[in-house]
Structure formats: C-alpha cells, structure tokens
Image (cartoon, grey):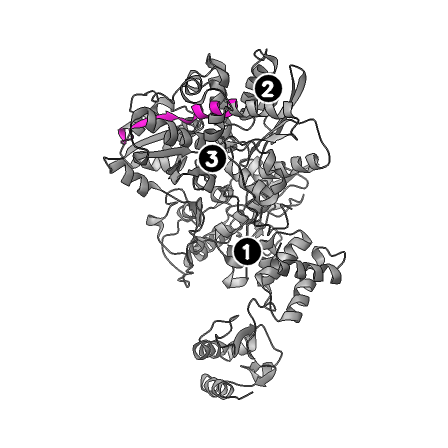
Amino acid sequence: MIFNIEVNNKEIKARKGETILEALERNGIKVPTLCHVEGFSPTGACRICVVEVEGKSALIPACSYPVEEWMKIKTHSPRVIKARKTIVEMLLSNLPDDCLYCERNGNCELQNLAIGLNVRERRFAGKKVSHKKDLSSTGMVRDPSKCILCGRCVRVCEEEVTVAAIDFIRRGSSMVIGTKYNHGFNNQSCISCGQCVMVCPTGALYERSRLADLQDALHNPAMHTVVHVSPTISVSLAEEFGIRAGKDLNGLIASALRKMGFDKVFDTSFAVDLYVLEMATELSRRLTDGVQLPMFSACCPAWVQYAEEFHPELLSRLTTTRSPQQLMGALLKGIYPQATGIPVENVFNVALMPCVAKKYEAQREEMIVDGTIHTDVVLTTRELASFIKLHGIDIQGIEPELADAPYHIRSSAAKLAGVSGGIAESLARTLHFILAGKELPELKISELRQNSSRREVFIPMGEHTIGLVAVSGMKEVSRLLDELRSGRKDIHFVEVMACPGGCVNGAGQHIGATDRDVKARVKSLYEYDDKEPVRVAHKNASVHEIFRKYLEFPMSEKACEMLHTRFANNSTAENGGGQ
Amino acid sequence: MSEKTCEVTRRLAERFPNAGKENLLQMLQEIQREQGYLTDNDIRCVGRYLRMPVSRIYSIATFYNQFRFAPAGRYQVKVCRGTACHVMGSVTVLQELIKQLGIEPGQTTRNGQFSLEVAECMGACSLSPVIAINDVFFDKVTPERIRQIINEYRNRED
C-alpha cells in the first residue's frame, strides 16, 4: 500500500511497512545514520537518525520506526539538529581524541558527523575509556577505546558471516564489544574475513599494517624485493585516489611499484591460471577416481578457516591446490631463486591483495616450508594506496608499464577471479578442455555472471554433466552446505568467496564504496574478458613454460610437492556451529 | 572432546532434555548454584548444547550481575549502588572497599578470603548506604567504618 506522508512541509510517497528512513532515502532526503547498516536488522542504538514527528513528544529514530499514514515529519528542525549534535558530542566525550593519529583520519564516519554538525568545542569531558588493543590476530587490530558501541560489527559477524565471533560484553557504562571470554581474536572462531573492518564507522577495527617491515626490506640493498598484484587491485585502487570507481589502473600500478623501489613486479593473475589448471586437473582425477564430490575451492582463506572451524568433515573435499597468493610464494621461494641465482633468504615477497584474511593465510603453518615463509608481507588495497601517497607518486601522471617476466602473462579468465563466479567460469573452460578435448563453444558463461549470492550452472563436458556453483557471503555458504547435507548430488565444484560478491568487494578494498562502485569494478573486470585474445587458463604461455622447465605436467609429482598442500583439522570445536 | 567437557554436557542433557534458547538462564543459574561460578568450559558446553555461539552466551552471562566467573571469596562483600545509597555516598564506600581489598567488583582476593560485588538495590534504603557481607547487613557505613569492618573480618579465625 502506498500513501502520502508530509516531510518538511512537502508530501512524499511512502510504502506501508517500510521504515521512515527508507521512505526518506527513496525520496532523496538525507538523514545521517551511524549504527544503521542497510540490509541488517535495525537497532536504533545511536539515535543519530532521530526526526521530529508531529504529535509525538519524543524524537523518533528514523531507522527503526515504521511509517504511518498520518505522519508529519521534520528532518532538520532546530530541535532535531540540536539533539544530533549533542549525541555526537557525547559519543566524542569518552573517545581518545587522537584523530590526527588515527587509522581512519579523513575517512571516519564519526569525524564526518562532527564536521557536518559543526561540533567545534568540547562541551562534555567524559572519563576516557582505556582498553588494550587486541593485536592477537594476524589480519586485523581491535582498539576498543575507539569503539562507540554501534554494534555494526556484531551484526555483520552474526547476520552476514554467521560466525558471531564478537558480541557485547557486560552492560551499561562498562559495556564493551569483545570476543568470547574477552580474549584475543586469535583464540576465536573468527575467520579473519574482515567484514567487521568494512562496517566499523571509526578506527576501532582496522587491518594490521605491515608497511614498516616493507620499508625496511625496500631500503635494504641486500634484499631483492618482489611484489605481485592481485587481479582486482587494478580496478579498485582508483577510488582511493578519488578517481571514478572501476577505472583500470593496470599498468600504472606496476610503474608506481617500480618507482617505490621494488625490484620485480609480477602479476598474481598468472598464478590464478596456474591455480585453475592444477585444480581442473585435480577435479578430473577426482571424477575418474570416484572420490566424493563436490570439490571446494580453497583460494579464499576466510572460507578455509570457516571450514576448519565449523565443518572439519569437509576438509578432505577442499582442493589441495594452494591459493594463487601461496602459489606465487611457492614459485618465488622455490623456483625463482634457482633461476636467477639470488639466494632464497634474500628474496622478499610482497603480495598486494584486496583482502584482510590473506594476511592470516601468509602466516599459516602450511605456508612456511623448510623454515622459509613463502609470503613475507601482504598489503591491502588501502595500504598500497597510502604507500603510493607516502612516496609522493602521482598515480595519474606516470606512464603505464608491463609486469616482469617470467610471471607476467595471464589469460583474461584469470582477471575474472576477482568476481564471485570467476574461478568457476575459468575452471569450466579448462575442465571442458580436459574432459571433452576441445574448447567450450561459448566461453562466456552468463549463469555465473548474475548478480546474486549464488550462481549455478550445469555444463555437458564429454560424458559428464558438470555442475558448478559459486557462492559468496558466508550466509549463502551455510545454506548451500545444508542442501548438500540433505543429499544434493548434482554439484561437482563449489567456488566459495567469503565476501559478498567476491574479492572485488573484499575487506581490503576502499572503505565506503557503494554498490554501484563495486558494480563498476566488476564491469571493468568483465571487459578484460571481452577484449582479450587469450581467454583460457590452459593457454597461458608462462604457465606452460613453468611446466616445461620445472614441473613436467599438471599434478606431476613435482607439481604436487610444490603447488599443493593439506589442510589439517584445526577446529577449536568450541562453537555451536555457524547457527 | 575433553573429559571435563563431556561431564558438563552430560549433566546438562540429563537435567534439560529438550532445552532451547529459552532455558539458557536457567542452565547458567543451575551450573552456578552447583559450583559457585561459571568457567569458560561451562560456557562453551552450554553453547554447544544449545547450538548457540559461545560469544553470545558469554555476552548474556556478563549482562547479568548474578553470574560470577571466578570462585567467590569466603566473605562475599556486596555494596548497594541503588539510588538511595548512591545519594548517601555509596561511591566513596565502594572506592574504599576497592582500596582496602585491592580488587575490583567481580573479583576475588588472591588468598580467597574476600570477593567484591555490586548490587543494584538491596531493598534496605532506610539503612543507606548499606553493604552486606555473607548476608549480614551493615547500615549507614562510612569509609572509616568500612576499614573497621574489613579489618575485623580479616582477623577472623573461621
């Protein structure tokens, strides 16, 4: 039912059942919010969205109050503005007051509200809350003293990620957000996906930076620093510099990295092709050997950790192929020193990833072979941007350059890996070649490109009909796992990405990107596939060369030793399951 | 699964056969009644038994003042922080106790003699500010009186 309500002396249309905020937003009237996250249950905790409703003595929170037909609303009356300003001042009263030194300086929602509401003096001096920082996680840092208890992280962890690693502890003025038993993140069911970092309005949650270590390595003349760039970074970095979303900075990144002092710049997309080729070979073997299917992808470290924590029975179904980041690590610390004559201990491998969980993955036990850590430092898109700014490089004023041999060639399919469904699409192309002996007649698989948390396709390949599913967002993953448990048998491969939409929307990307920005990134990635000649992983010349020179053929004994791993059952078995 | 874990879960299953989320507080109370406080292991077991995230159980348990996470002392000191006691200066009383005992509310002294707790209102407003030690009430206390009372209990033989 649609009816009219009066807002600021004008009639607007509202739908029955929606909240005041939804009606206002649809009509282009902006009300500031803080604890509100679109798509999640409203809590009305922060009261920043209050509006004046005629006939009501108290101010009404727009985010959680349903519209009613008789309503006459004032969104910016003096009373409302005064209330909002007071709320922000009170929130600020017990925070540490170190905005200049804060991770989120310049990109902080609370700061923006304070600016917008013209807070210019300190009227309330509250007792500062002091808490120790939680530095236990390899992926992110929690600083409860900057927490304003909006509860966004709690809701995203429970409703979107379905892990519920954090919750409110105690109550009233002593309330904090913390993990169970109020211990560190590492002691937890936390899967390091970083979704909480993406929704935190202040600097209470942020990724663990390794820029200092990187600086040391870059300035050490004995160190040979190599860097490889994940497929999505080229289409997501632009936003950090205020350039339009989705603008491709491919060659510019390589050029900037060289200017900053990296000795070699490689392309992680090369390793994506290697990953897909190994995985397709592995899947075809599992098919012939009659191993229980579906096989799950294992390139998303948050998903791997989720499986370990909540579904250890699935670990044997994960592909044993290392993730592209770790494949690069294995090559750079295994083959590369041999080929170049640089001692392995002098190779410093940096990965640029759109991801917080990759920081955790690099530190995993399996990723340290014979005492050599394969990936030394992982930087997020955000860290890369700040590093480029630190070096005073004008990203738009430099000439594009190509990546370095030998890990520079990629197929356009590898670029797709940045979007949910991309690994499955690339795998389908290569698997079809393996099973049917020829290329897929139509390489573009539009079923895997729909805008949905689950994408399914069934493709005849030789004598099999292969079912491929791509899921993104852990909520959808647990739904799919339920279906598999209740006996669904038509699926052969499942691609899992913990972040909704895949790595383009990863937790290492620009904070504050809208849906439209993410779609623009996706579009740019798909454009690669429309334009380029080499569109399948198994035609990647660099990958062929690796096999010819060192690893013989996919899944050869040598390849298995270098490119594959095993996931152990690490479950702390403490949680009642992902709900 | 450790033996201890099994034991708690077994007892829960016995006492609360078809338990759901609505039985959570009852379960926690039962465990506390039996052993005096809740351990990490108990919370984990309840979480697993009810198929609820452990962080949520911990969140709910810490919300209520009634649950303890460390063994209580031989003398349980309760300070009323209700409105009447607050007006009559229970803040200074609490501060004095924290100073005398060297512990924060919710903690137990290392020798296990005292534990300190804060109560919302003990229903003895006419005696405010009031404290109770093992259910013996002390009325109209002052910081000075607190020192005497604590010293007296400290030197008790029982």
In the rendered image, residues at marks 2 and 1 fall on the same chain: yes
Label 3 with label 1: CB-CB less than 8 Å = no
**Residue underneath mark 2:** A446
Q: Residue furthest left?
A: A221
Can you give x and y, in whole percent of width and height, for residue A299 in the image?
51, 32
Does residue B82 sit above or below A19 in this rendering? below
- Give the residues drawn in magenta, as a range: A259-277
Name the foreground residue: A454 vs A369: A369
What is the spatial separation of the Cα atoms under label 3 and label 1, in whole angstroms?
Answer: 31 Å
**Residue underneath mark 3:** A513
Query: Residue type at mark 1?
Result: Lys
Does residue A156 sit above or below A561 in this rendering? below
Frontmost of labels 3 and 2 is 2
Mark 2 lies on a secondary structure that is: helix
Query: Residue type at mark 2?
Result: Ser
- Residue A74 shows in this picture: no
Question: Which chain is mark 2 on?
Answer: A
In the rendered image, residues at marks 3 and 1 fall on the same chain: yes
Q: Quadrant of residue A209?
A: top left
- Residue A180, which numbered label? 1
Can you give x and y, in whole percent of width and height, for residue A478 in the image?
64, 39
